[in-house]
Image (spheres, rainbow, N blue to C red):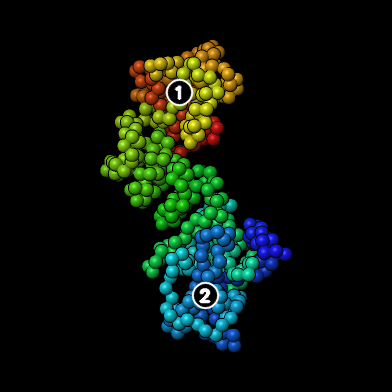
């Protein structure tokens, strides 16, 4: 077999879940059971005891490789590189060399101490979409080296660690979560940051729905929550914030550095951003607005000027407009350019040359119309259903709700005294405003 073929085979092997292999499951070594075990030289003589296992948790490897061990020799904590280890087993560690560096261990950038930084810490079960805690970690030989392959989050395993020493070393393969299914957190250590970061191979976390991420953020502790936010791109993090309970979101924004909090609010949809800002104290709100670009800050200040409980206070300023002489194909092209706001758009406002409202065309009507149909032709056909239903910014939410139900539409345009569109109030925003005691009631919007 050629070298390239062997490497391809190695990559294919690592792309599969390692813990699905019977061989791997039969060779699991419990980290909790390993701590305190003897380290023996080639002659079988004990030279020290295991204090911790060092691994590199991020990078291109789907399973973090063990780079060495921290062992106690007398009063010293020395470091053994992975090359000096012949075998790691349930009874301890066997060395492949008689030479041991007795210098005191100092953490290097990128190194994570598994027992100190990950064991008993929070992590995200990406497959199960829940926050859990590592009761044990499992090591196993894989492709010529020892790697971290899984985690055990079960209560029986936590209780096992409290029992006799002979119980602590027993792995429980039936309870193992594959390492590729979790995202770990590590606290910042006094002797240097643990630097646990999200690896590219954990892209499943980025595929979680905003509502799932919101649940995860609400369950995490303060340190872990900020770390997860750092892992996500601002847009994805903002989507998750929109789905959070107001009190939890308020706490999160207060915990985050002002620059980061301002960026998150800036990335939120305008109506959601206003809701978040209203929950903060005036000085906190101004602190965030001062850190935003002037145009975005001015837009949010304009929305905040509307009283809470009114259409203007609940509307989003994301409004797609079209002219009567445009074709349906042209309007669809403009909609494609607004994909990032797809949850805020369910219709297109048709305006005249002065920006005054003529009609409000639902996305469904645009979807079934011919590409060459003009907007004028489309609104002529829609005229049989009556004029668009609109509200003024000062109208109460309860009035908007009655209009929404009566017209059987999913949103209402908010217009000024000259009939120019100011924004749009959507059905779920009406429900959120009317039923605050029920929490956030987000429904799947059209095209989401």
Which quadrant: the N terminus? bottom right
Q: Percent x, y for residue 150?
A: 59, 63
* Residue 230 vertical placement versus 155 (above, below): above
Q: Residue at x 49, y 50 (%)?
A: 216
Q: Nearer the viewer, residue 24 or 220?
A: 24
Residue 77 falls in which quadrant of the image? bottom left
Please tell me whether mark 2 sits on a helix, a strand or a loop.
strand
Q: Position of residue 284 (x, y in %)?
A: 30, 44
User: Are the residues at dot 2 and dot 1 in contact (C-beta closer than 8 Å)?
Assistant: no
Corner quadrant of residue 435: top left
Residue 397: image location, x then y, percent:
40, 27
What residue is shown at x 46% (from left), y 47% (from top)? 233
Residue at label 1?
A: 321
Q: Which residue lies at the image location 29% right of the left edge and 44% below the top edge?
A: 287
Residue 197 showing in the rendered view: yes
Answer with left or right where residue 340 lies relative to residue 156. left
Q: Residue furthest right?
A: 1
Q: Residue at (63%, 57%) from the top-left corner?
A: 15
309 shown above or below 34: above
Query: In the drawing, what numbered circle is on residue 126?
Result: none
Q: Earlier in the sequence, mark 2 or mark 1?
A: 2
- The residue that disc 2 covers is 81
State the quadrant of the C terminus: top right
Q: CA distance from mark 2 to mark 1?
A: 64 Å
Badge 2 crowding class, 10 Å Cα cut-off, few under 14, some 14 to 19, many 20 or more, is: some
Q: Quadrant of residue 437?
A: top left
């Amino acid at each position: 077999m050629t070298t390239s073929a062997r490497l391809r085979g190695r990559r294919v092997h690592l792309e599969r879940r390692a813990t699905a292999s019977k061989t791997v499951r039969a060779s699991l070594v419990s980290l909790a059971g390993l701590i305190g075990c003897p380290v023996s030289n080639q002659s079988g003589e004990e030279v020290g005891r295991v204090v911790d296992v060092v691994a590199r948790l991020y990078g291109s490897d789907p399973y973090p490789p063990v780079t060495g061990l921290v062992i106690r020799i007398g009063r010293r904590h020395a470091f053994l590189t992975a090359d000096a280890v012949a075998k790691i087993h349930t009874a301890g560690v066997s060395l492949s060399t008689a030479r041991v560096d007795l210098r005191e261990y100092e953490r290097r950038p990128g190194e994570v101490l598994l027992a100190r930084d990950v064991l008993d810490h929070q992590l995200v079960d990406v497959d199960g979409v829940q926050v859990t805690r590592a009761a044990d970690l499992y090591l196993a030989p894989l492709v010529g080296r020892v790697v971290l392959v899984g985690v055990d989050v079960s209560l029986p395993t936590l209780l096992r660690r409290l029992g006799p020493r002979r119980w602590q070393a027993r792995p429980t393969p039936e309870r193992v979560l594959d390492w590729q299914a979790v995202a770990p957190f590590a606290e910042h250590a006094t002797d240097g940051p643990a630097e646990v970061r999200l690896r590219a191979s954990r892209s499943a976390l980025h595929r979680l729905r905003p509502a799932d991420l919101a649940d995860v953020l609400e369950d995490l502790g303060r340190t872990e929550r900020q770390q997860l936010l750092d892992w996500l791109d601002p847009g994805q993090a903002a989507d998750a914030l929109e789905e959070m309970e107001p009190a939890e979101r308020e706490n999160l924004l207060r915990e985050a550095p002002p620059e980061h909090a301002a960026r998150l609010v800036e990335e939120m949809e305008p109506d959601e951003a206003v809701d978040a800002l209203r929950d903060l104290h005036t000085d906190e709100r101004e602190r965030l607005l001062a850190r935003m670009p002037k145009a975005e800050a001015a837009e949010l200040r304009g929305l905040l000027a509307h009283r809470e409980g009114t259409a203007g206070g609940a509307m989003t300023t994301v409004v797609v407009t079209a002219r009567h002489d445009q074709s349906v194909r042209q309007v669809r092209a403009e909609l494609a350019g607004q994909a990032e706001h797809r949850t805020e758009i369910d219709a297109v406002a048709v305006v005249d040359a002065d920006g005054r409202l003529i009609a409000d065309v639902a996305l469904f009507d645009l979807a079934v119309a011919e590409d060459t149909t003009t907007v004028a032709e489309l609104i002529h056909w829609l005229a049989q259903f009556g004029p668009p239903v609109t509200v003024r910014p000062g109208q109460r939410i309860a009035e908007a709700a009655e209009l929404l139900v009566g017209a059987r539409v999913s949103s209402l345009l908010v217009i000024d005294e000259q009939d120019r569109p100011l924004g749009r109030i959507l059905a779920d925003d009406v429900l959120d405003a009317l039923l605050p005691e029920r929490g956030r009631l987000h429904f799947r919007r059209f095209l989401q």
